[in-house]
């Protein structure tokens, strides 16, 4: 029993010895490390502590910062400012400035007679519940807003009228009307004086014109004329030819486009031209001349035509003396 107690006591002392052994071993290792150190050198434990960094160290830290970080801060600041401004505008729109009204009493109305006074200020509104009649002129220095319908019984003179929406007018009389955009007229348009169109004109439906005067008419499709064709213009001149014979005469009626030629031969008419017709207006080239004989005597002639851009001649190879010949002509360029 006593031996076990001693064994137990010895075993219990072993941990302390082990712990003390570790302490001894650590001290021995430190002594060996100091003994092996070179002369004149300091161990790691003997080195001085690191000194605090000065201004140069701060500059190195700032230089190492990423420039994108500053850009991010700038964008974030702009976004916050925009958000604050938007919230302020929203508050102003939600709470508009109220305009107070002012009602005229009978005493105020009586005071207006024969006086030039001001009532209220720009932030107030004058409400007139009953009808108002102004015997004189009404001058509105600012804008005029009309919430309901406007009825004008007399003549209205407007120096400048701008209609941004839709306007309906029963009758408008103006000295000069300028339309910069498109104009749509769904009813009838009546122009009592001259209308000048500097650009092109397009008509989707039929156009009724009592008289049309154009310098140059170009048709891309067929021309349908229900009435007659009256070729106007000046009367062309004429010159007698040798085929009239001695004492023969000629005459012409019509225009450059169409007309009638009368020929009366004299004695001994030779073959040749009865007359030469000179156009009142010269053609650009030699026109197309068509003549038709009137009567059997004229039809029995061997007639022919010569032409150029200034005139044409009616001729025959076998004229007879003392005869009357009649020709109708049509000239087309």
Image (cartoon, rainbow, N blue to C red):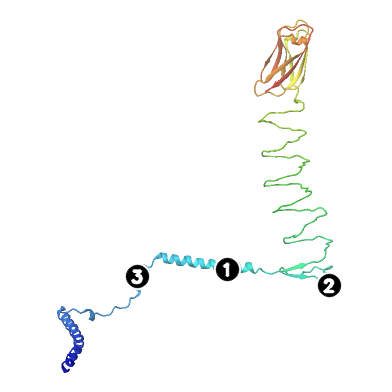
Q: Is residue 185 left or right of residue 37?
A: right
Mark 2 or 1: the one toward you: 1
Cβ atoms at labels 2 and 3 below 8 Å apart: no
Q: Residues within 10 Å of mark 2 (few under 14, many from 20)?
A: few
x then y, percent, for residue 56:
34, 72
Q: Which residue is mark 3?
A: 60
Mark 1 or 3: the one toward you: 1
Cβ atoms at labels 2 and 1 below 8 Å apart: no
Q: Furthest-front residue in view?
A: 1
x then y, percent, for residue 288:
67, 20
Where residue 236 sits, quadrant-wise, is top right
Task: Kindly report the distance in space between the C-alpha atoms of the residues bearing marks 2 and 1.
Answer: 47 Å
Residue 264 visible, this angle: no
Residue 260 vertical position relative to residue 97 in the rendered view, above or below:
above
Q: Which residue is mark 1?
A: 87
Q: Residues within 10 Å of mark 3 (few under 14, many from 20)?
A: few
Residue 12 vertical position relative to residue 310 in the rendered view, above or below:
below
Front residue of 127 and 157: 127
x then y, percent, for residue 310:
68, 20
Q: Which residue is mark 2?
A: 107
Front residue of 9 and 81: 9
x then y, percent, for residue 226:
76, 28
Screen quadrant of the N terminus: bottom left
């Amino acid at each position: 029993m006593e031996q076990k107690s001693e064994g137990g006591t010895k075993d219990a002392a072993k941990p302390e010895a082990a712990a003390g052994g570790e302490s001894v071993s650590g001290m021995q290792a430190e002594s060996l490390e100091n003994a092996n150190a070179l002369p004149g050198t300091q161990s790691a434990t003997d080195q001085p502590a690191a000194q605090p960094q000065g201004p140069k160290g701060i500059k190195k830290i700032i230089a190492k910062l990423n420039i994108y970080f500053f850009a991010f801060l700038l964008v974030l600041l702009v976004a916050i400012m925009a958000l604050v401004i938007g919230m302020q505008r929203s508050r102003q729109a939600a709470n508009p400035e109220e305009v107070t009204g002012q009602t005229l009493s009978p005493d105020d109305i009586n005071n207006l007679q024969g006086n030039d006074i001001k009532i209220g200020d720009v932030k107030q509104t004058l409400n007139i519940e009953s009808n108002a009649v102004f015997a004189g002129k009404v001058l509105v220095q600012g804008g005029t807003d009309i919430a309901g319908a406007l009825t004008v019984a007399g003549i209205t003179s407007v120096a400048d009228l701008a209609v941004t929406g839709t306007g309906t007018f029963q009758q408008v009389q103006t000295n000069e009307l300028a339309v910069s955009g498109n104009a749509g007229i769904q009813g009838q348009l009546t122009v009592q004086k001259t209308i000048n169109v500097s650009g092109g004109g397009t008509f989707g439906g039929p156009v009724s014109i009592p008289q049309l005067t154009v310098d140059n008419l170009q048709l891309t499709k067929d021309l349908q004329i229900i009435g007659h064709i009256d070729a106007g213009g000046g009367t062309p001149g004429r010159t007698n030819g040798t085929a009239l014979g001695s004492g023969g005469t000629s005459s012409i009626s019509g225009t450059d486009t169409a007309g009638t030629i009368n020929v009366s031969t004299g004695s001994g008419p030779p073959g040749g031209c009865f007359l030469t017709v000179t156009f009142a207006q010269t053609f650009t080239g030699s026109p197309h001349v068509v003549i038709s004989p009137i009567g059997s005597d004229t039809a029995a002639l061997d007639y022919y035509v010569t032409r150029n851009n200034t005139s044409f001649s009616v001729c025959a190879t076998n004229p007879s003396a003392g005869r009357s010949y009649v020709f109708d002509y049509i000239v087309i360029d």
